[in-house]
Structure formats: structure tokens, C-alpha cells
Amino acid sequence: MAGHTVYTLSEVSRHKSKNDCWLVIDGRVLNVTKFLEEHPGGEEVLLESAGKDATKEFNDIGHSKSAQNLLLKYQIGALQGHTLKNNEQVGSTEEPKKKEMSAFVIKDDLTPKYAAVVEFAAPLLVAGSYFCYRYLTPSS
């Protein structure tokens, strides 16, 4: 842990504003003030976790390897009681190149696939039936 400044959680908790934003992930103390505007999820996400240990929130999202390696760029020290290897990396700094594009999608919608077809076709059938009835029945 040579070369790392050691901070307590109470020291980190003093840095929770938009102009001075620190947080802890995996025992690393990060100054993410310059990253607030660049964060893909918006600065609000980081500000909610500012001054706290955000390890659980960070891991729950499922960040890419390159996002995990950004931790090293913004690391300013270590949290007291945590041991870090010097220049420890989570994985390679580049995403592996694949021939196919892959995506991870969280889908909360549990409706069956045919429901969209039914929602589209049912009103058309009703409207078509009404107009056929009006056209085929003699008017009084």
C-alpha cells in the first residue's frame, strides 16, 4: 500500500458537493469531481453516493472493465482498514474485440411477445367489423 494516502470514512464524508466529490469503491478513495459531467448515468448518481462507500451501488450496476479501470485514474488514496495492491487493475484496459455485438439488457416487462400483436390487431378488427356492418346493412 506504499504511495497511497490513507483516509477515514469521516474524512471522505466531508467531500460530497458538486465542487468537491469523493466516494469509496472497493476500498479506494476516489475524487470524481472532474468526472461528474462525463458520467454516463448523470452527475446525480455520483452525488447521491458522494462522501460514502459506494461499492454496493457500483457493483449492482454491472460496469464494464474499462469503467472499472477508471477507478485507478480517479483514485487518490485508500480507505483506512483496506489493503490494496499497488497499481492493481480489475482487468485489461481495453474491451475485448468480438465479431458480434453483444448487449446486456434488463427487461422488467413480463408481458408475452404476442400481446403487442393483439394490442395492435384487436382495435383494427373491431373498427373493421363496425364499418363492414354499417356498409352492409341497409339504412332505414
Image (cartoon, rainbow, N blue to C red):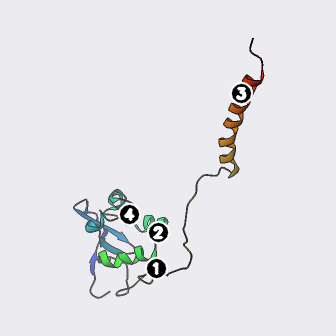
The amino acid sitting under disc 3 is Tyr
Circles 1 and 3: CB atoms closer than 8 Å: no
CA gap, disc 1 to disc 3? Answer: 57 Å
Identify whether 72 is placed above or below 34. Answer: below
Instruction: Please give the residue where the numbered disc 4 appears in the rendered image.
Output: 40
The amino acid sitting under disc 2 is Asn
Circles 2 and 4: CB atoms closer than 8 Å: no
Instruction: Please give the residue where the numbered disc 3 appears in the rendered image.
Output: 130
Identify whether 118 is placed above or below 83. Answer: above
Name the spot of residue 123 as percent of width and height, x first: 67, 36
Q: Of the residues tagged 1 and 3, which is closer to the observer?
A: 3
Q: Which residue is drawn at 47% across and 69% down?
A: 59
Q: Of the residues tagged 2 and 1, which is closer to the observer?
A: 1
Label 1: state its secondary structure.
loop
The amino acid sitting under disc 4 is Pro
CA gap, disc 2 to disc 1? Answer: 18 Å
CA gap, disc 2 to disc 4? Answer: 16 Å
Q: Callout 1: 10 Å neighbours few (<14), some, many (20+)?
A: few
Numbered mark located on residue 95 in the image: 1
Label 4: state its secondary structure.
loop
Disc with the residue nearer the chain's start (4 vs 1): 4
CA gap, disc 3 to disc 4? Answer: 50 Å
Q: Which residue is drawn at 77% across and 17% down?
A: 138
